[in-house]
Image (cartoon, grey):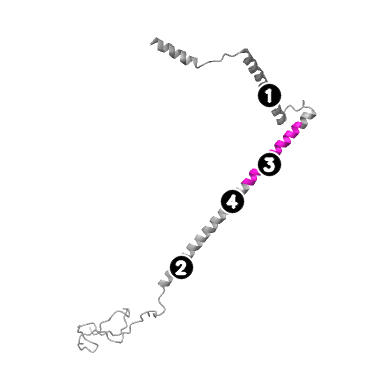
């Protein structure tokens, strides 16, 4: 078992050759690090100059270079702004066109519904009207009290006092009863 473990340790650590830092590579790293620190410092100084800070110590050439940088940056910013505005206007014009089309479709639907409702209303009114071939029904007038009305086999006496043959005769009288109510005479 020990021999297996020894072989395992030799094989597993043999594949891993960990390089030890040499003096040469340490010197290269320190020079590279110092270069990067100087670049960071220069960029920070340039950024402060672009912001308008610490420009008193700059020479005329440095100020002219700063001015050129600012001009080119402004041109790029303005062109990007114009590009975004053109894209926005194009999208808004597309949206306007779509909304106009939608409005047109909705107006068409509303007009169709109004036409259908108008047709239904006119058909409904036409069905309620009396047909022109039928004359209107006359209202009943007052009943004439002069003709006698037979009401069945009722015998009673008439004005003279004679028994009548089973018909009820309505005579005009001057009472408070309405004209349509039958009046029995001869009682």
**Element type at marker 3?**
helix
Q: Which comes sooner in the sequence, label 3 or label 4?
A: 3
| Image location of residue 144, percent across then percent down | 33, 84
Quarter location, residue 101: bottom right
Q: Which comes sooner in the sequence, label 3 or label 2?
A: 3
- Dot in front, 2 or 4: 4
- Residue 115 horizontal side relative to residue 154, left or right: right
Q: Residue at x 63, y 48 (%)?
A: 89
| Image location of residue 26, percent across then percent down | 62, 15
Q: Which comes sooner in the sequence, label 3 or label 1?
A: 1
The residue that label 4 is drawn on is 94
**Element type at marker 2?**
helix
Q: Is residue 162 above or below residue 79?
A: below
- Looking at the image, which is closer to me, 170 or 84? 84
Q: Residue at x 46, y 15 (%)?
A: 11
The residue that label 3 is drawn on is 79
Q: Is residue 121 above or below residue 143?
A: above
């Amino acid at each position: 078992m020990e021999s297996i473990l020894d072989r395992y340790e030799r094989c597993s650590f043999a594949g891993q050759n960990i390089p030890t830092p040499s003096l040469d590579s340490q010197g290269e790293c320190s020079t590279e690090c110092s270069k990067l620190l100087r670049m960071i410092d220069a960029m920070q100084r340039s950024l402060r100059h672009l912001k308008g800070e610490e420009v008193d110590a700059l020479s005329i050439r440095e100020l002219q270079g700063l001015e050129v940088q600012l001009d080119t940056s402004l041109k790029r910013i303005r062109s990007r702004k114009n590009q975004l505005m053109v894209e926005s206007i194009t999208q808004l014009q597309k949206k306007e066109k779509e909304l106009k089309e939608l409005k047109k479709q909705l107006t068409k639907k509303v007009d169709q519904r109004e036409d259908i409702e108008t047709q239904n209303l006119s058909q409904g009114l036409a069905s309620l009207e009396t047909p022109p071939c039928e004359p209107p029904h006359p209202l009943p007038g007052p009943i004439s009290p002069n003709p006698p009305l037979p009401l069945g086999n009722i015998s009673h006496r008439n004005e003279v006092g004679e028994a009548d043959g089973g018909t009820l005769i309505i005579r005009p009288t001057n009472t408070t009863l309405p004209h349509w109510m039958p009046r029995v005479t001869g009682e």
